[in-house]
Amino acid sequence: MAARRSTSAPSLAALRARYLVEGVALPAGLLASLEADPREGAQRLAESLKKRQAENRAEGQRLRHMLKFEVELWAEGYVHIAGVDEAGMGPCAGPVCAAAAILPHGYKLKGLDDSKKILDEAVREELATAVKRDAVAWAVGWAQVAEIDEINIYQAGLLAMRRAVEGLSQSPDYVLVDARKIPGIAQPQRGIIKGDAQSLSIAAGAIIAKTTRDRLMLELDAQHPGYGFAAHKGYPTPVHLEAMNRLGVLDFHRRSFAPVRKALGLDPEQQDLFTSGR
């Protein structure tokens, strides 16, 4: 007579919930036991767990790669390294927002990446919340629409980043910046091309800047229905351009940007400043 399976052994459903859904670390021997189990469900679970292990290894390697600049600087004796990035260079409405974040040594947050690659708003918010919770320090800096129109969008982005660095409760020893250098700060710094995809600290600043500005645009959408700010976040989409022509230009539209000037009946080329960016 075949021996009965122990009733105290966890079911495959329980194993799936614990180790696949909840992500609890696998105990030694469990995967081998599942691979030796002839049941189809056990084989499927084993394959899923092996796939998850491979994904976790790949994610760990990606995160280690994104800490390469920080690791070098920590080894040189720099303790607090701030990553800085901005959001809102391209829209023709609303301020530009920058954020700076100092991560703990060796910090790795699963899923933290270039904010442009993270399309799900809820995921971005979860990551931003985790960074704010775990960071040694973080701060946001703004450049308002009047400043954008006065000094141009590129300089306004730098101004917002400087304000973010200056707002940190812990002064950084070194600053990593996405693609440029910030005038007027005392710390040594390095601009990294596509920095939010190369440095975890810059990615942390980018995700805070992006989610902070997006929340502001949601507030503006509630205050000014019909423009679609919740969807396009101020970018000059066809919906936004049509709304400006139909409903008018608002105080927080950037009058140095060609689409806004055109909606006002002005020469769109006369003061069309640098408008590329995120």
Image (cartoon, grey):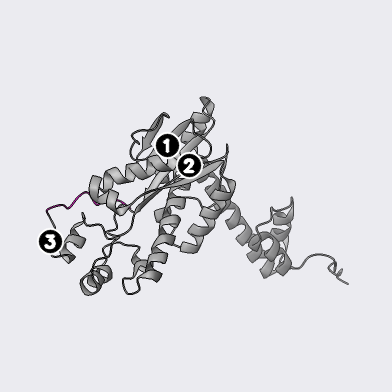
Left or right of 177: which side holds 173? right
Q: Tag 2: Cα neighbours inside 10 Å, few (<14), some, or many (≥20)?
A: many
Q: Which mark is residue 201?
A: 2
Q: Main secondary structure of the magenta part?
A: loop
Q: Point out the image quarter for the N terminus.
A: bottom right
In the rendered image, the vertical position of residue 24 relative to residue 134, given as above or below: below
- Residue identified by numbered label 3: 266
Q: Which mark is residue 176?
A: 1
Answer whether labels 3 and 1 touch (C-beta < 8 Å): no
How far is the residue under mark 3 from the one under mark 1?
Answer: 40 Å
Is residue 171 in sight in this rendering? yes
Look at the image and give the residue range highlighted in magenta. Answer: 270-278
Q: Amino acid at mark 1?
A: Leu
Q: Amino acid at mark 3?
A: Leu
Badge 3 or badge 1: first in the primary sequence: 1
Q: Residue at x 41, y 56 (%)?
A: 213
Q: Is residue 273 magenta?
A: yes
Q: Tag 1: Cα neighbours inside 10 Å, few (<14), some, or many (≥20)?
A: many
- Nearest the viewer among 229 and 66 is 229
Q: Is residue 244 magenta?
A: no
In the rendered image, the vertical position of residue 188 relative to residue 139, given as above or below: above
Q: Amino acid at mark 2?
A: Ser
How far is the residue under mark 2 from the one under mark 3?
Answer: 42 Å
Left or right of 259: which side holds 121? right
Answer whether labels 2 and 1 touch (C-beta < 8 Å): yes
